[in-house]
Every structure is written in structure tokens, then in C-alpha cells.
């Protein structure tokens, strides 16, 4: 691989790895505080899978960027993480050290984010199956088999909340109304994706995943009466919301300030620590 | 120079247990893809799950078991996915000995209906139901047996 392409592809793989790491971290926060014990187990397992996938993508990125995967995961400066901003937002309630509940958690956000992200990630990994870089194409096959379970879990909860007889349909709708701009931020491209696609390394640029994703999401919103702020037009979709961009260029919000501090704490205290 | 045969390496690998399911060894679990003899002995290992936390431990245990035969390299390979179809027939009964239902046959399905009923590892009944797709490790689900009224864990199809 030419050095320029390797650098751009390594940078692209960091966006994938960062997405998986950050969502894995946020979802792991549900351990012990999910609405039911089955979901403590499920979200912990989902989070562990995502962090495992992040590790794989950091290993692959590390080969291209000649960098240590652990360093890529936990020792980059705060402005050099490229996940979509949607994923860094905290969804769990806050607690003080005494264990007192301070409120603020939103299970509807956790469910909607995980499912709509997984529908996006499924399109992204499908496109990576055709990558001309064989180590990546092979590894992605494995990731996709695991993700089948995530999609199954997500579909069950999505339908359960949308059809619930209590407050859940309204809560889910409110999350969607608030988060469509962040959801569209998933489709922001990393630098140089056009060249990566031309070279066959990338099956499909990230921005080209948006329309197939909208098709999938429309099929999951319209029959359930959930809000969906797009109109079908002749050559695709007309958007009625603007995306929140910047995540894939390293610009993030307050959720990232909090999460970065927490997830890098041990590594910063003991950079060479092992266990 | 390596003088050991490939067969001897495979026999020795049967001594290496899965750290989380000690009744099964790495060969019957199907995670050893290939043994290559050269200047050193290379063992190719396929992870059950990409994020399996037992991976590094298994690498070390394989290397420790084979050290007497020469210089060992345990390489984790990802270009071909491990699937539950790789578990041997002996391996399936070793899972049952650990109280774990072996994975159902067939491919992963998106619908919750299994292709065949999951058999209770304690009483052999097929009157079982899925309680949670996810379990205490990434590769397991949680079931309940209506016949002997025991919860039990089963291997996911992957």
C-alpha cells in the first residue's frame, strides 16, 4: 500500500475504532443500573463486544500507522478522537458516591442510539467486506457474525418501546426528535475517503451509506408512527434537519470531556501499567 | 531444529483447556486452525469472539504446554472466522459436562425462533426457553428448563 493511502486508511480505521470504543464505554455504564437485570447482562455483553471490535480496528490501524494499538486507544490527545458526537453522550443516570440517584438517565436514548447506530454499522461493515486489504475484509466477517445478535436485541427493544402502553412511545419519539442531527453526524467522512474508495480499500464512502440507512430507518419508524423528518423525493431524500458535524474531525462536546477524563484516567496515572 | 511431528503437537494441544470452560480443550473447541513446523512451531488460533478476554491467557497456556518441543509462535488469525460448527462431536459432550448446552446446529438466525430446540444439559429435556440472548460471557446465552426447572447457559451460534 502506498504511504499516503496507508496513512489515510489508518486514519479512517480510527473513526471506526473510536465509534466502537466510545459506544462500548457508554453502554458499559448500564451495568447494574439498567431497567432490568437481563439488560444489565445484555448491555454489558454488547459493550464488551464493541470494545473487542474497537481493539481489532486499533490493531489494524496500528499496522498502517506504525503505532501501538493500546496507545491509539487510550493515549491520544483529546482532540484526536474521531467518533461521531452522538456516541459520546451520556445516557445513564447520575449517582453520587453514597449511591444516591440524581436522575437524568434515559433508557430510550440508550436503546435508540444502539439500534440506529447498529443499522449504520451493519452497512459500514458490509461495505468493508469488499476491501482490497485482506486482513480487514477477513476480520470484518467475524465482526458481522457477532453483530447479528446486536441487531436482534435492538429490534426487540425498539418495537417494545414503540408499542408500549405507558410513556415509552413518547419517550422514544422525544429522543428521536432531539437526536436526528447527531444521528446524521454518523455519515460525516474522514479525510481522503474518495481516494480510499477509488483504490478499492473502502467499498463505499461513509456519506454514501446515508440513503440506504434512511431506507432502513423509515421502515422502522413509519409503521410504528415514530417521527421521521425526511421526505422521499425522486433521487433520494429531502432532509428537514441539519446534521451535527465535527466529530470525525476531532471536535466534540461536553459528553466527551467527561468520558475522556474517565476512560484515560488509569492509563495517564500508570502509562506502563499492566495487569 | 524441530524433530517433533505435527501429530505430537496436536496430541499435546489436547492438554490445554479453555480457561472459562475447563472440561473442553482448545482442539475440540475448534480454535486451532493449523500447526506449521519450521524453524519454530507455529500454531494458528482463531478467537471465538473478537473481544474474548481469555485470548491472551490461552496463547500463553498453549505456548507453555508446547515449550518442551521447541520455539513456539502462537498466532491469532482473523482472516477466517471461527464458527460454532468447528466444535467437534466430542467437544459438544465436553460442553454438556460443564453444564453448558452446545450451540444449536445451523446458521445464525435473525428471528428468535431456534432452528432446533436447545437441550437441557442437566436432564436432557427439550422443554426449554431462551431467557436472555446474552450471558456471562460473550459466547453464551441464558436458558430455562421447564422440565427440571433449572436455569442453564448455552453456547450461541456464531
Image (spheres, coloured by chain):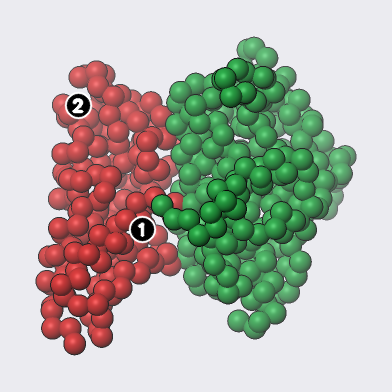
Chain colours: A green, B red
Q: Chain of mark 2?
A: B
Q: Earlier in the sequence, mark 1 or mark 2?
A: 1
Residue for point 66% across, 82% down: A3
Q: Which residue is mark 1?
A: B56
Identify the disc placed on residue B125: 2
- In the displayed image of the protein, which residue is found farthest to the top? A166
Residue A16 vertical position relative to residue B142 in the rendered view, above or below: below
Q: Residues within 10 Å of mark 1 (few under 14, many from 20)?
A: few
Whether residue A58 is visible = no
- Measuring from the top left, give residue B155's x and y in whole percent: 31, 41
Q: Nearer the viewer, residue A145 or B51?
A: B51
- Measuring from the top left, give residue B22's x and y in whole percent: 20, 46
Q: Quadrant of residue A208?
A: bottom right
- Measuring from the top left, give residue A83's x and y in whole percent: 69, 52
Q: Nearer the viewer, residue B32 or A77?
A: A77
Q: Secondary structure at mark 1?
A: helix
Amino acid at each position: 500500500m502506498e504511504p499516503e493511502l496507508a496513512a489515510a486508511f489508518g486514519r479512517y480505521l480510527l473513526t471506526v475504532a473510536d465509534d466502537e470504543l466510545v459506544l462500548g464505554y457508554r453502554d458499559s455504564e448500564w451495568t447494574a443500573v439498567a431497567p432490568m437485570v437481563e439488560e444489565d447482562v445484555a448491555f454489558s455483553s454488547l459493550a464488551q463486544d464493541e470494545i473487542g471490535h474497537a481493539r481489532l480496528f486499533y490493531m489494524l490501524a496500528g499496522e498502517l500507522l506504525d503505532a501501538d494499538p493500546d496507545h491509539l486507544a487510550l493515549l491520544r490527545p483529546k482532540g484526536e478522537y474521531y467518533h461521531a458526537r452522538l456516541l459520546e453522550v451520556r445516557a445513564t443516570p447520575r449517582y453520587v458516591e453514597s449511591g444516591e440517584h440524581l436522575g437524568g438517565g434515559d433508557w430510550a436514548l440508550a436503546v435508540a442510539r444502539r439500534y440506529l447506530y447498529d443499522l449504520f454499522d451493519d452497512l459500514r461493515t458490509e461495505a468493508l467486506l469488499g476491501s482490497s486489504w485482506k486482513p480487514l475484509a477477513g476480520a470484518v466477517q467475524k465482526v458481522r457474525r457477532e453483530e447479528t445478535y446486536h441487531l436482534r436485541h435492538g429490534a426487540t427493544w425498539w418495537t417494545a418501546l414503540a408499542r408500549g402502553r405507558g410513556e415509552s412511545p413518547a419517550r422514544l419519539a422525544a429522543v428521536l426528535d432531539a437526536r436526528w442531527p447527531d444521528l446524521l453526524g454518523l455519515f460525516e467522512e474522514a479525510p481522503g475517503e474518495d481516494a480510499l474508495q477509488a483504490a478499492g480499500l473502502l467499498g463505499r464512502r461513509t456519506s454514501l451509506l446515508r440513503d440506504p440507512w434512511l431506507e432502513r430507518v423509515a421502515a422502522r419508524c413509519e409503521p410504528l408512527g415514530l417521527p421521521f423528518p425526511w421526505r422521499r423525493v425522486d433521487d433520494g431524500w429531502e432532509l428537514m434537519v441539519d446534521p451535527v458535524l465535527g466529530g470525525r474531525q476531532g471536535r466534540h462536546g461536553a459528553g466527551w470531556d467527561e468520558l475522556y477524563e474517565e476512560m484515560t484516567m488509569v492509563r495517564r496515572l500508570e502509562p506502563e501499567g499492566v495487569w | 531444529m524441530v524433530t517433533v511431528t505435527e501429530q505430537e503437537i496436536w496430541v499435546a494441544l489436547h492438554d490445554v483447556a479453555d480457561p472459562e470452560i475447563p472440561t473442553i480443550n482448545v482442539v475440540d473447541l475448534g480454535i486451532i486452525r493449523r500447526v506449521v513446523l519450521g524453524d519454530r512451531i507455529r500454531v494458528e488460533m482463531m478467537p471465538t469472539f473478537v473481544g474474548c478476554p481469555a485470548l491472551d491467557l490461552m496463547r500463553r497456556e498453549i505456548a507453555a504446554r508446547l515449550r518442551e518441543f521447541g520455539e513456539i509462535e502462537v498466532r491469532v488469525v482473523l482472516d477466517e472466522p471461527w464458527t460454532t460448527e468447528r466444535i467437534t462431536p466430542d467437544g459438544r459432550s465436553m460442553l454438556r459436562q460443564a453444564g453448558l448446552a452446545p450451540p444449536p446446529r445451523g446458521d445464525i438466525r435473525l428471528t428468535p425462533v431456534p432452528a432446533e430446540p436447545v437441550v437441557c444439559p442437566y436432564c436432557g429435556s427439550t422443554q426449554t426457553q431462551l431467557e436472555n440472548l446474552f450471558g456471562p460471557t460473550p459466547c453464551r446465552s441464558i436458558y430455562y428448563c421447564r422440565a427440571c426447572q433449572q436455569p442453564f447457559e448455552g453456547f450461541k451460534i456464531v
